[in-house]
Image (cartoon, grey):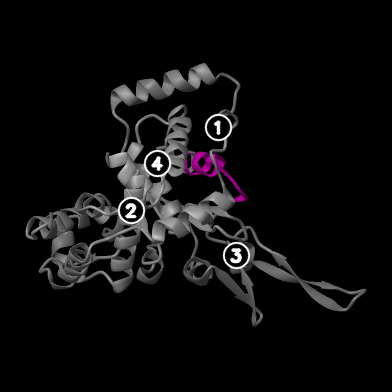
Amino acid sequence: MEETFFENRTDLTDLHQAVQSIQQEIRRIIVGQDEMIRLIITALLADGHVLIEGVPGVAKTLTAKLVARCVDSQFSRIQFTPDLMPSDVLGTPVFHPKEAVFEFKKGPVFSNIVLVDEVNRAPAKTQSALLEVMEERQATIDGKTYPMPMPFMVIATQNPVEHEGTYRLPEAQLDRFLFKIMVPYPSEEEETQILSRFHELGNESPLDVIKPALTAQQIISLRQKIKTLIIEEKLIQFIARLVHQTRNHKSVYLGASPRASLALMNAAKANAALSGRDFVTPDDILLVTAPVLRHRIVLSPDKEMEGVSEDDVIKQILQAMEVPR
């Protein structure tokens, strides 16, 4: 009876099958990291960008590449370095002497899925080149605006701030990422599986094993469908109350912005769609709360010194709230 109920409203069967196919393809290479894979796919469908943080060597870049491979669309990779200039990202006008005109040569950011590797190694000037691109899906160069190809998504990786040669990302840029995903070390058992899997691959490249499961046009269509999913008024109020609590908590110096509320709602809708439902439940919101909020709140200096994390504070806020049922 329930399946018929779903079919009468928004049919998400194709999406459910495509997502399962993507997860299966990636699991052929990546061991564990199921949460990272699911969140990247959720962000892709919610029209959001992703920041992945972890120490070097935990498959951040490889996972991002594999997800991009699962989508039949344009992909580009930009390695951020301390000497990278904004024009290296956005592109630059090139002068043609014969015609005596400037032609804009587009940079690597003009792609469907853009992997920005080690985003916190570039200085503020280059970081700012991404601000307009990420929020408005366009770049303005010499007074002329160039739209990004659709769908558009930035997947950025960064090493923890304590590492050598890293810059802390400004709050304005962090706010433009839908999720911040933390990637831990694998367990000993998982590491054994990783070694076995790569041994079995032999000379075959991990990227050559993956087959596309979604086209760019399908993603555009699914994004439009997801935006129309049902969310009850009490859940909208819960999201607003939750974000508001981050601004009044004793451990928080700077709370989340209204962009965080929109991010929570859009991510919850995408999460519901991944589960094959056309309506949002409280669990959809709770599943995405930490990755949506952890990079949008700034803890008070005394709490940082005590070693309290953003996730700890988010947990405290949720425990003190009544979750609607």
Q: Is residue 173 left or right of residue 68?
A: left
Amino acid carrying label 1: it is: Ile
Amino acid carrying label 3: it is: Met
Q: Is residue 122 left or right of residue 243?
A: right
Task: Give the alpha-carbon distance from disc 3 to disc 2, as whole Å.
Answer: 33 Å
User: Dot 2 lies on which element?
Assistant: loop
Camera-near label (2 vs 4) is 4
Task: Give the alpha-carbon distance from disc 3 to disc 4, as whole Å.
Answer: 24 Å
Q: Percent from the top left, x then y, of residue 264?
A: 29, 61
Quadrant location of the N terminus in the rendered image? top left
Provide the residue span drawn in magenta.
63-76
User: Dot 4 lies on which element?
Assistant: helix
Q: Earlier in the sequence, mark 3 or mark 2?
A: 3
Q: Earlier in the sequence, mark 1 or mark 2?
A: 2
Q: Residue at x 43, y 30 (%)?
A: 27
Q: Earlier in the sequence, mark 1 or mark 3?
A: 3
- Residue identifier under label 2: 162
**CB contact under 8 Å: marks 2 and 4:** no
Q: Earlier in the sequence, mark 1 or mark 4?
A: 4
- Residue identifier under label 4: 37
**CB contact under 8 Å: marks 1 and 3:** no
Q: Earlier in the sequence, mark 3 or mark 4?
A: 4
Res 310 visible? yes
Task: Give the alpha-carbon distance from disc 2 to disc 4, as whole Å.
Answer: 25 Å
